[in-house]
Amino acid sequence: MSGVAWILNDLWYTNIVCIDANQSELTDKLKAKWLNVIIGHGKNKVQLGDVVIYSEATFECEEVLEARKIMKANRKVMVILNYFQFLGEVSKYFTSVGFAGTNGKSSSTALAIHTAKKLMPNFGLGILWALVPGFNTQSYVVNTKAKKDIRNIFDYIFTGKALNYKNIKKRSFFVEACEYKRHFLYLDLDYAMITSLELDHTDYYKDMKDYLSAYETLLTKVRHKVLIPKWLKLKPATCNLQPVTIKSIPFTHIRGKHNDINGSLILELMTKLCKEPKTKILSTMKTFWWLWRRMEYLTTNENGAKIFTDYGHMASSIGFGYQALKKKFPKKKLFVIFQPHQINRIVTWRKDFQQALKNYDNIIIYDIYAARENLWELTKKIPELKKIKDLNDLGEHFAEACWGTYTTDFSVITKEIQKAQKDTIVVVYSAGDVDYKLRKYLGK
C-alpha cells in the first residue's frame, strides 16, 4: 500500500492521505516524503468523490465502511478498490507481466524490473512487495519518460477522464502476482512466470489440489506465454505453457540455488519482450544488487558477527537460506532467529520447520506473529498439540521441537545478537514485526 501512495505522489497527485493502524518503518518513510500520514483508523473523514484504495486486511475499517455508506446514500459511483483490484484495473491498460509462485515472487519481480528499465524503452511501471535499494529504496519503478501516459491511465481509472487510446498496451507493467485468496486472478496478464509451487496459505487453501487449481485458473487467463521451471507440474491450459531448463546463473550479489530458477526464467522472458541478445540481457541482470529483507546484510556487531535479515516465513525459505549462507560462509556458525508468521503455518508445517531449522547451530524462536486465528481450532485435531493452552505455550512447544528456545522479550534478541562472535553469522527470518524492531535498535 505504501508503494501505491508513492506512485501517486510521483505522478503529481496531491491530497494523498495514508492511513495505517500502527506506526512502522513504511509509515516513517511516507512521512519523510511529506505525505499526510494518519496513525489509527476513524480519524479521517471520507467525502463523496474520494478515491479509496485499501489493504484487504482493512476492508472493514472505518474509512472503507464510510465510503460505502456515502456511495449508497448518494447513489453515485465512488472508486473503492482493494489493493489487488487496483492492480487489476491498472493491468488492463498495459502489456502486463505477472511474477507468481510460492517462493521468489519479489526477488523475480525486482530482477525483471531492473533488467527491463535498462533494456526496454517501452517499460512503463513495475510494482512489487519489497523495497529495493536500486529503486531508490522503493517498492516500485515508474519510467520518468512515461509519466504523462501513466497519469492519463490513472486519471481514467479514478475519474473517467478521457483516455488517450494510444496509451492502451503501449507500455509494459511488471507486477508481483500474489496467490493468497486467488488475488492474482484480478490481474489482466499478457505474460507470466511461476517460480515454484508449494502448499501455502492453508488458512485459505484446503489442500495442494486446491492450491494448484488457483494457478491452473491463472494459466487460462494469460494471453501469451507462461514460463515455468521444467520440472513444475501443471495441467495443460489454453495459454502457451513454456517449460524452461534451469541453468546456473553466476550472480555476483545474489546467493542461493533458488536464484538460478528466477534468473533462468527471467532470461527467457526478456528474450521475448525485448530485442536484445541473451548475452546483453544476462550481463544486465548480473548488475542487480539486492532487495529489502531478502537475505539483506544489515551490519556487523562489535565482535565481528555479520547480521542478515530475511522475509522468509516458510520452512523451504529457511532451508534455502541455510544453503545460501553455508555456501557463502562455509566455516562460520549459523545462528537463526525466527519469528513465525501465523499460527496456521507452524501448526500445519511444524515437521518441515523442524527439518529446516535443525542444521543451524543456535536457534531462537521469537514471539509468534498471529493473524486473527483461532488457536484451539487449529490445534484440537493434532494429538501432540491438544494440551496447548495459549500462544506462548505453542511457542514454547514449537521451539522445543525445533531444538531452540522461545522468547517474547525483544531484549533477549538484542543481547544474543550483541554476544555473537566473529565466527558466527546471525540471520533473522520474519514476515512479522521483529525486523522493524531490529532496524530501530541497530539504527538501520
Image (cartoon, helix red, strand yellow):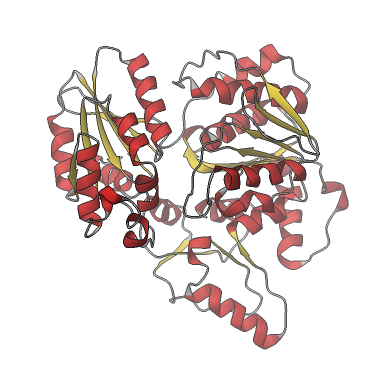
Indicate left or right for 59 with 29 as reference: right
Image location of residue 156, percent across then percent down: 77, 61
Q: How many marks?
A: 0
Q: In front here: 441 or 200?
A: 200
Indicate left or right for 366 with 292 as reference: left
**Is residue 15 shown to the viewer in this render?**
yes
Residue at position x 48%, y 76% in the image? 62
Image location of residue 406, percent across then percent down: 19, 44
Q: Based on the displayed image, in which of its 4 quarters is residue 159 positioned?
A: bottom right
Q: Quadrant of the C terminus?
A: top left
Please tell me whether residue 64 is drawn above or below residue 405 in the rendered image.
Answer: below
**Is residue 95 shown to the viewer in this render?**
no
Q: Based on the displayed image, in which of its 4 quarters is residue 366 positioned?
A: top left
Indicate left or right for 137 with 409 as reference: right
Image location of residue 108, percent across then percent down: 57, 31
Residue at position x 48%, y 62% in the image? 57
Q: In front here: 141 or 335?
A: 335
Please tell me whether residue 24 is drawn above or below residue 442 in the rendered image.
Answer: below
Image location of residue 381, percent across then percent down: 35, 55
Q: In front here: 285 or 409?
A: 409
Please tell me whether residue 89 is drawn above or below residue 218 in the rendered image.
Answer: below
Instruction: Point out the residue furthest to the right here.
Output: 165
Residue at position x 81%, y 42% in the image? 170
Indicate left or right for 252 with 369 as reference: right
